[in-house]
Image (spheres, coloured by chain):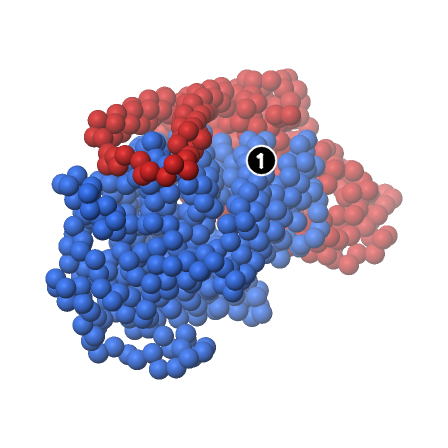
Amino acid sequence: MLNNSPFSPASPEAQAITHLFIFVGIVILAIFVLVATLVLYAVIRFRHRPDGAEPRQVFGNSRLEKTWTIGALLTVAVICIFAIRTMHEADASPRPGEKPNLVIVAHQWWWEARYPESSVVTADEIHIPVGKPWLVELKSADVIHDWWVPDLGRKMDAIPGHPNHFWIQADKPGTYLGTCAEYCGAQHAWMRIRVIAEPEAEFKTWEQQQLEVPPIPVSGEAAAGSKLFNDLTCVNCHTVAGTPAQADIGPDLTHVASRETLAAGRLKDTPENLGKWISNPQAYKPGAHMPDFNLNPAQVQELVAYLETLK
Amino acid sequence: MSDVPFPGTGEVLPLARPKEPVTGLLAWVSSVDHKKIGIMYLLASLVFFGAGGIEALLIRIQLAWPMNTFLSPRTFDQIFTMHGTTMIFLVAVPVLTGIANYLVPLMIGASDVAFPRLNALSLWLLMFGGLLLYFSFIAGGAPAAGWFSYAPLSEKAYSTSPGVDYYSLGLLIAGIGSVIAAINLIVTIIKLRAPGLSVRRLPLFVWMVLVTQILIILALPALNASLVMLLIDRRLNAHFFQAQSGGSAILWQHFFWAFGHPEVYIVVLPAFGMISEVIPVFSRKPIFGYEYVAASTVAIGALGFLVWAHHMFVVGLGHSIDTMFAISSMLIAVPTGVKIFNWIATMWNGSIRLTTAMLFAVAFLIVFTIGGLSGVTLAVFPIDWQVTDTYYLVAHLHYVLFGGTVFGIFAGLYYWFPKMSGRMLSEKLGRWHFWTMLIGFNMTFFVMHFLGLMGMTRRVYTYPNLPGWGLLNMIATIGAVIMGISSLIFLCNIVVSLRQGEVAGDNPWDGWSLEWATTSPPPVHNFDRIPPIRSRRPLWDLAHPENPDWKHEH
């Protein structure tokens, strides 16, 4: 049951937090059992009996007060020490001037990912090599968002004008689910993240494939779709490498057909869903910044045919 | 000016006071009597509690199962924003101000608050602010940027409807009312205590009200100032909170939480005060460690100003700042723990009467402890990095604000309703109310801990069908419906008991503080005479001349 949870850590950073959580959890559980037992015992044991006499009037006891004050202080002190130790394990400070391996820019309501070394650009699905601690720089293009992939470690806010840094690492290959955790407007719910961790070789292959410039189709529906894409306003918001479309308002579509989902996790990436999405984005993500263009079914089919060539 | 008791005799000198001229509705609307104003505060917060409760139910219906389309995202965002804003500003604050308004003069042996007309002004400012906020629904859309209205989402570019403007203006007006009410109560407590009622003999409820009002006058101006800045941003195109033009989005968070965290104590401390009155009377013992309970209140109030950035552990303020705020936040657990243990020690060896008021107080001890302990996990900032802004946090805050504040208020209302109305609330309906509320509350909010730990974030209008999410959300929704039914039982209890409740008499619970020394409900001038005050429990001393408290206190 516990996948994608602070209790299914898949990185040293997340592991450190899990250990701390379990330790603090045991401490607070013990305190809760103590308090609940005392309360319930008192209610049962000292319940009013019909004989009616008032109990002995006791006003306090300084020694007891000191005992539980000091007890509470010591408990807090121990927890503090563990918290500070975990802080360094879970969120090491980058060296001054250290270059990020990955730059993530949060948008209403999708994630842009840029790989400075290879100059790969992608969206919503972030590939990383297994076992390598990567420094991520996190920015926002509009309002405040928050990066959260529970298996891989801490949350971090994406704040306009205030770039943040955190480490991302996965011990094992796999797909790790996450989501935006700071309320960011109408489609906060559909701003989901997939981190795909792959062995180094596979990651390199993926990077190479992402760097390829897809050929511009010359015949059939796809060619008509390509022309439509450039004639309509698609190019005002999206990028497709090797074409005049070079905008950064919406996700980069250069390899959109190679992704698993559309619209930040809202739909599975199939030709059929792509068609539905293009025909009426507002039906799937009401409030999203992509408008309904009132395309006719033939236009949708052509656009889908074109976009499906962008592998 | 109000009446002052004549020193020594307990007689009341009638001073020039506005007459209570008429009857019926106008008598209420034009009243400057602290008791009528207190009751109007309570009625206003009851109405807003209904509105906020309906909003909560709409939220829970929408989230009952994955991919539900009951509410559109825009509607859902308005509803959850209004739910939070209503419950904090139009329910928790006014209900506590109302109870304090009603009780403080009675508990200190005064005939009214220090400034009765100002008191009426505070009430009407609150009502006007609340109505203005709700007017937004028919004036282009309610605010949809969340109750903490983070910039830049709350700025014109991202919130184009006038909702946030209504939010700013409504809260500003209600907030000014709260500050005025706070000044009024502080002056009342400092200047109008009956002879013999030294600060060290003040009932703990009055102590906690005093600390709370000081928090209000120190914290609310931070909110009021930032609301004005937000309005200037939105209406006059300034950019206090817009990074693109040199402002700072983080600045809003600092301002908001500099108010917002003391606000938590503003709505929790008076509930602590009520618990500190209810538990002793129904355990038939004086409060254990009076000085420690009072001092821990002051400690919580002071520390409350040093912890605001624990709401901002994921903002990226740096390790040293995170560490400092984590330590101060965890320190608050110490005075809070001291209170819990003192309440338990008060019950120890007592003679506990499980009235509905006491049931709520006992339940408070347990559910508030859960909220306090999950609060410790959130103060441990590496854990907060994982669980903040998830349903785990939603669970935590409801255990504190519902399990703490609301359960405390229910305890207080069952305890003091006879004083306010002259009639007892039905214990039978009270028990139905209590048990359904306890079950519904835990069903709704306990499972939210797990939802958060399974990765569900807050403020989402829907969610994908991930394993377990649908089931737990459905349980929470059923719990919320049970809480709704429970609230209706409470409402029935009030209506039925006002007409047919058992007549209470002056002191139905054998209480010990001054409010029980006058009739139920008290006359306009509150007291015909005030008993001699030589200890913290003047009525105990009267009833037990063989063993008075003043022999033990020092």
Relative to B333, residue A205 above or below? above
Residue at the image point whose x is 49% and y is 34% from the top = B387
Residue at the image point whose x is 36% and y is 29% from the top = A96
Instruction: Please tell me which residue lies in front, B84 or B489.
Output: B489
Relative to A298, residue B500 above or below? below
Q: Is residue B58 left or right of residue A306?
A: left
- Asked whether the viewer can see residue B171, the reply is no
Instruction: Please tell me which residue lies in front, B209 or A10.
Output: B209
Residue at the image point whose x is 41% and y is 35% from the top = A49
Relative to A250, residue B319 above or below? above
- Name the subunit of mark 1: B
User: Residue B20 in the image: x percent, y percent?
Assistant: 34, 78
Residue A128 found in image quarter: top right
- Asked whether the viewer can see residue B63, the reply is yes
- Please give the letter of the chain rendered in blue: B
Q: Which residue is mark 1?
A: B447
The C terminus of chain B lies in quadrant = top left
The amino acid marked with disc number 1 is: Val
Mark 1, residues whose alpha carbon is within 10 Å: few (<14), some, or many (≥20)?
A: many
Residue A78 found in image quarter: top left
